[in-house]
Amino acid sequence: KAKGSAEGQDLVCRCSRRRGTESLVEMIARVGVLGMRQCPASVTSTTRACAAWRTYRSSAQRAGCLKLREHRTQTCCPQTHKVRGGRHRSRLLTQLAAADIAWSSASVESNEKVGKDRYKLVLDIGEDVAKGYTVPGQYVQLRCGEEQKPAFIAIANAPSESSLVEIVVKTNDGTAGAICALGKGEELDVSPVMGKGFAVEDKAPLSTCKNVYLVATGTGIAPIRALIQSGDLEIPSRESVALYYGYRNQDYCAYSEEFPEWEKLGVKVIPVLSEPGSDWQGDSGYVQDTFKANEKLEEPQGVVAIIAGQYELAGVFSEMFKEAAVPEERVILNF
């Protein structure tokens, strides 16, 4: 409802009187304030969520419907006035989104440690869920129980008719860590396949995008691997395809054993290590700095960048491309 409207104020008051049996998150999901229930965190969607909470809070104060301190204690909504960064925005949005997901059961087929803090798992997500995986770069949400916040995990293999998918997960003290601890045969919850993926046929057509830059950091290599495997890029027909892959060092790298195979396909792989060992002779530092030093973008109309990993990386490359007069739509993300 529009902020300040009589109908909206009435709705806020009625919702606040229900607070003994309904949390704020449930109220927002029921009313449909966000309009974005199955999307990863973004600046726009999170801003809407925060605005919805502020509108509700201020209206309820004016109506004398609640005491803020008590309400924050009793509800599961985070204190959004303290939201500052992407991690906090993500927490808010996943709490709001999880209630609307049609969860299915998946099982672990294999689990292999592929670095000091990351694991490669093969999951059987079932035929019904697998049918939704049609474009490389898409992802699923995973959790090991209803009490956990879902983790957004990109699929690392190309779409196929199989119900098996591969993922790479960096462990932590939360949901990702619980997923990494699963053994063969154990089950977890999986959402429908989500995201638009890397729609290269539409956004990076062979006729106009001769030079392709793949950029990944950390576990962001997973959806890039899926794209390379899929054949959608038509790599042999491009003038150049270069992969800039940023990671800490060899102990924190996934799929390095596949680099020679990718090179044979026509992908020039440029690893960029942020904490290299003393024997490393390649590029080091930040992936965006190495890219800027190496690539002059002298033919901006024929360039496209496909990016996965840190969300902030997309903004950095968008700015670089803007300075080089590369069309704005030539920075492609998978969400």
Image: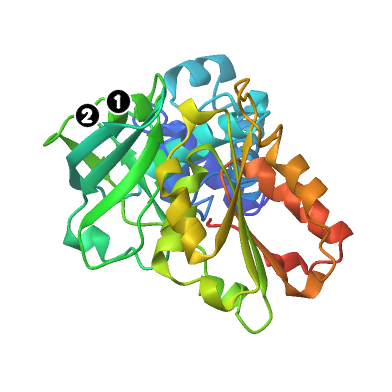
Q: Are marks 1 and 2 in contact (CB under 8 Å)?
A: yes
Q: Give the residue displayed 65% in from the left and 23% down from the top.
A: 82
- Viewer-proximal residue, 62 or 55? 55
Q: The N terminus is located in which quarter?
A: bottom right
- Viewer-proximal residue, 74 or 144? 144
Answer with left or right where residue 132 lies relative to residue 64: left
- Viewer-proximal residue, 76 or 321? 321
- The spot of residue 29 in percent (x, y) is 43, 46
The quarter holding residue 108 reads top left
- Name the element at disc 1: helix
Residue 295's label in the rendered image is: none
- The spot of residue 297 in percent (x, y) is 81, 63
- Label 2 Cα neighbours within 10 Å, binned few <14 / some 14-19 / many ≥20: some
Q: Residue furthest bottom?
A: 207
- Label 1 Cα neighbours within 10 Å, binned few <14 / some 14-19 / many ≥20: some
Q: Is residue 91 above or below residue 311?
A: above
Q: Which residue is mark 2?
A: 182
Amino acid at the residue labelled 1: Ala
- The spot of residue 243 in percent (x, y) is 59, 53
Q: Give the residue displayed 25% in from the left and 48% down from the top.
A: 103
Answer with left or right where residue 39 lies relative to residue 131: right
Residue 196 visible, this angle: no
Q: Give the residue displayed 68% in from the left and 50% down from the top.
A: 314
Residue 40 visible, this angle: yes
Label 1 to label 2: alpha-carbon separation: 7 Å
Q: Is residue 81 above or below residue 159?
A: above
Amino acid at the residue labelled 2: Leu
Q: Which residue is mark 1?
A: 178
- Name the element at disc 2: loop
Answer with left or right where residue 121 lies relative to residue 87: left
Answer with left or right where residue 42 lies relative to residue 124: right
